[in-house]
Image (tube, rainbow, N blue to C red):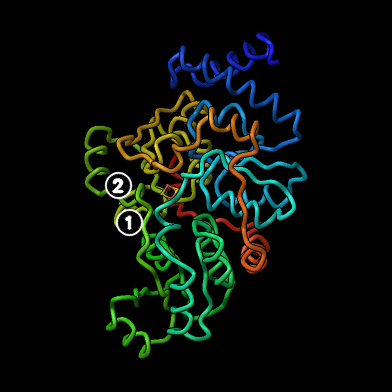
Amino acid sequence: MPTIEGATETYLKLREKLQDVVPDFELRHKAQLAFEINLLKAERGAVILGHNYMEPALFHSVPDFTGDSLELSRKAANTHADPIVFCGVQFMAETAKILNPNKTVLIPSPNAGCSLAASITAEDVRQLRKQFPGVPVVTYINTYADVKAESDICCTSGNAAAVIESLHADTVIFLPDEYLAKNVAKETGKHIIFPVGDPLSVKRLSQELDCTLVGWRGKCEVHEKFSVEDIRRIREQFPDVVVLAHPECSPEVVEAADFSGSTSAMIRYVEKTHAPRYLLLTECSMGDNIAAENPEKEMLRLCSVRCPHMNQITLEDTLSSLRYDRYQVEVPEGIRVRARRALERMLEISGSSSSSNPRIASSY
Ligand code: SF4
């Protein structure tokens, strides 16, 4: 049974980080849960991976590793622990299973989906391949295993440009995020078309088969909501604010921001720069997590926009997950083997690459 002393230590550790972010009575409750999870984790030889969007008390207490999709994929590829508990959404836990077929991979909630992953099917990819024979397919890691299995290589927001450039192909199919595709097209000097429902762009493509990204109209239901008007209003109120936008935001928002990069690139940016305040255009919990690590810096965030999928993952469900081995992630072997190939290609080329847009990286 957990001891009071152990739970108290967990509480004190959390309070040191989160006293300005989470009310005290809630911290005490969450510290007890975190302590029980950590005890059970040690007993079972488990590892917990936590995405940067996890709520602050969970993020700062139970994961052995935290990070963005790419970093957690690397950890999943290298871990010897079993079971792996993935505090993130379904496609991330699937990625861990694809890389660790003989281990038990658990996700605390079966309802942690993703609007981007749900925007495209394996059949959609097969149709695009028929439409553009011989054109390589890059799929964002925010897709389900059967979609990854139809692709040549995966990417994350942190390495999308490097992955595209590694293919040395004039034309690339890039799926499924419309805004990430537009932002990456700009970064790699390609123009972009969206062939489904737009026969004109296909006609144009047959005339100019050079430097083209073939996109899809999937969107992140969180990042699509941020607008240039949001940035204008915040700058009006806080003229010294530095604005960071995730590349799943629209190109207009990315253009109006001071920096764009993956969640981990944003964290590094805040750590390395010295602005008085930052606006984070990404899931709100990450603002809390960065604020806890950088108490001297003010984090503005627009928390009316939350990811309903990431928020499914709670300390309560993480404890139940470890206690009852639920919910186990399975990927059919025929799909897993092909999806793994696409993931491993990405991991091979992404060792040192990360694409972010440090427009003012040297300003602070
Ligand atoms: S934040 Fe967007 S991309 Fe990430 S899990 Fe939520 S819906 Fe999917």
Compared with residue 241, is residue 187 higher up or lower down, i.e. above or below?
A: below
Compared with residue 113, is residue 206 higher up or lower down, i.e. above or below?
A: below
| SS for callout 1 | loop
| Identity, as a three-letter code, of the amino acid under mark 2 | Phe
Compared with residue 139, is residue 96 higher up or lower down, i.e. above or below?
A: above
Alpha carbon separation for disc pair 2 and 1: 8 Å
Find out whether the residues at labels 2 and 1 contact each other: C-beta distance under 8 Å. Answer: yes
The residue positioned farthest toward the top in the image shown: 4
Mark 2 or 1 closer to N-term? 2
Q: Between 301 and 336, which is closer to the camera in this rendering?
A: 336
Q: Give how far across and how far down residue 363 sits, in percent.
A: 43, 43
Image quadrant assignment for residue 8: top right
Graded by Cα atoms within 10 Å as few (under 14), some (14 to 19) or many (20 or more), the crowding at tag 2 reads many
| SS for callout 2 | loop
Report which residue position mark 1 lands on: 250
Q: Give how far across and how far down residue 151 sits, in percent.
A: 55, 71
Q: Give how far across and how far down residue 241 sits, in percent.
A: 33, 36
Q: Give how far across and how far down residue 309 sits, in percent.
A: 43, 43
Graded by Cα atoms within 10 Å as few (under 14), some (14 to 19) or many (20 or more), the crowding at tag 1 reads many
Compared with residue 127, is residue 99 higher up or lower down, i.e. above or below?
A: above
Image quadrant assignment for residue 44: top right
Quadrant in which the C terminus appears: top left
Side of 334 where 253 appears, left or right:
left
| Identity, as a three-letter code, of the amino acid under mark 1 | Ser
Residue found at x 26% / y 39%: 235
Q: Which mark is residue 226?
A: 2
